[in-house]
Amino acid sequence: MKQLPAATVRLLSSSQIITSVVSVVKELIENSLDAGATSIDVKLENYGFDKIEVRDNGEGIKATDAPVMAMKYYTSKINSHEDLENLTTYGFRGEALGSICCVAEVLITTRTASDNFSTQYVLDGSGHIISQKPSHLGQGKRVALFCLFFLVYFIFSCLFFLKLLHLKIRCITSGLLMIKGS
């Protein structure tokens, strides 16, 4: 897996934003298909807001690629924009996992055909590995997402609370001004 050159990133950048459970599942299924999966299992808890799990029997992610597997603009599909002419994959920009990390807690368990065991990686919001441990999984990849859009809901809740607080303060000050004025 290689980082795309800056000039290529500028040409290809889609500013991908994950906006729904459907867009997350679509991206993960496309990643599985690109990895040669012939079996893909999708599980949702609370319609995907609590947990999304996509498991496949594809190639898996090489241990050497793991540190950059969810970093934006790292991809194994192309090296430059010229490669787009022969593209046969769904994904190629290296944005899906990185964008998903911004809106959910992400665990990726993966094993390639040459690995003796699988490894589970916990990723932070920037796509960096914050922990890893051996796991048990056949060849392929399992992506588990938790608390999808939690941070977004938290921010909106805070903004709503602040607007409500501002409104209450205005009501109190208006009331006090009316009392003082009479």
Image: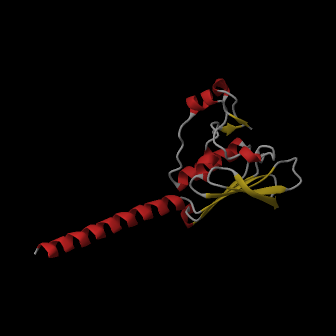
Q: Residue at x 62, y 30 (%)?
A: 6
Instruction: Give the left or right position of residue 182, taking residue 110 as reference.
Output: left
x and y percentages locating residue 61 in the rendered image: 77, 47
Q: Position of residue 125 (x, y in %)?
A: 62, 53
Residue in the picture at 32% in, 65% down: 166
Q: Residue at x 26, y 67 (%)?
A: 170
Return the residue nearer the eye: 80 or 125.
125
Query: Would you place residue 3 above or below residue 145 in this image?
Result: above
Question: Image height check: is 50 above or below 31?
Answer: below
Q: Nearer the viewer, residue 95 or 36?
A: 95
Q: How many marks?
A: 0
**Residue 13 drawn at (x, y percent):** 56, 35
In what quadrant of the picture does the N terminus appear?
A: top right
- In the foreground, 40 or 110: 110
Q: Residue furthest front?
A: 180
From this viewpoint, which residue is outermost toward the left?
A: 182
Residue at figure coordinates x 54%, y 37% from the top left:
14
Instruction: State which quadrant residue 71 falls in.
Output: top right
- What sort of colour scheme is used for the picture? secondary structure
Q: Quadrant of the C terminus?
A: bottom left
